Image (tube, helix red, strand yellow):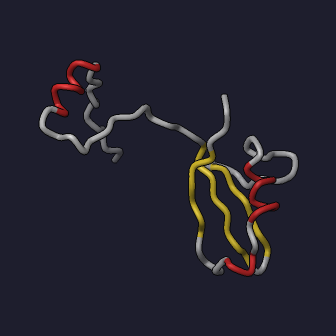
Amino acid sequence: MMKKYEKITRNDKRQALNALNGMPDMVITEKIDGSNASFRLDNGELRVFSRRQELDEHNTLNGFYNWVVENINVRYLEEGLIYFGEWLTKH
């Protein structure tokens, strides 16, 4: 059975400023949204993924595949771990 989550209400700027009253260390910023991306070492081979599929030189997730191949040294990766992150690109 799939759980239905409650609707998240969106506050306007005035409501956000009221919520900050008395909280000088809080900062509200815009939401940065990228693409889910990951890589892992699999039997000595570097494998790169988007959220739903494995990437290659033809399907790069806007350059993520290329960045991993050019910048990740497999000597420092641990077999069995998946390294997750967000891939941000200019839209």
Q: Is residue 67 left or right of residue 57?
A: left
As drawn, 6 above or below 77: above
Q: Position of residue 35 (x, y in %)?
A: 60, 43
Residue positioned 16% across, 26% down in the render = 18
Q: Residue furthest right?
A: 58
Q: Position of residue 52 (x, y in %)?
A: 64, 49
Residue positioned 19% across, 33% down in the render = 20
Q: Position of residue 81 (x, y in %)?
A: 59, 74
Q: Is residue 18 left or right of residue 76?
A: left
Along the viewing direction, whichever of 5 and 24 lies nearer the viewer: 24
Along the viewing direction, whichever of 81 and 11 lies nearer the viewer: 11
As drawn, 89 above or below 43: above
Q: Is residue 4 left or right of residue 17?
A: right
As drawn, 84 above or below 22: below
Q: Position of residue 14 (x, y in %)?
A: 22, 18
As drawn, 76 above or below 66: below
Quadrant of the rendered structure where residue 41 is? bottom right
Along the viewing direction, whichever of 8 and 62 lies nearer the viewer: 62
Residue positioned 28% across, 31% down in the render = 8
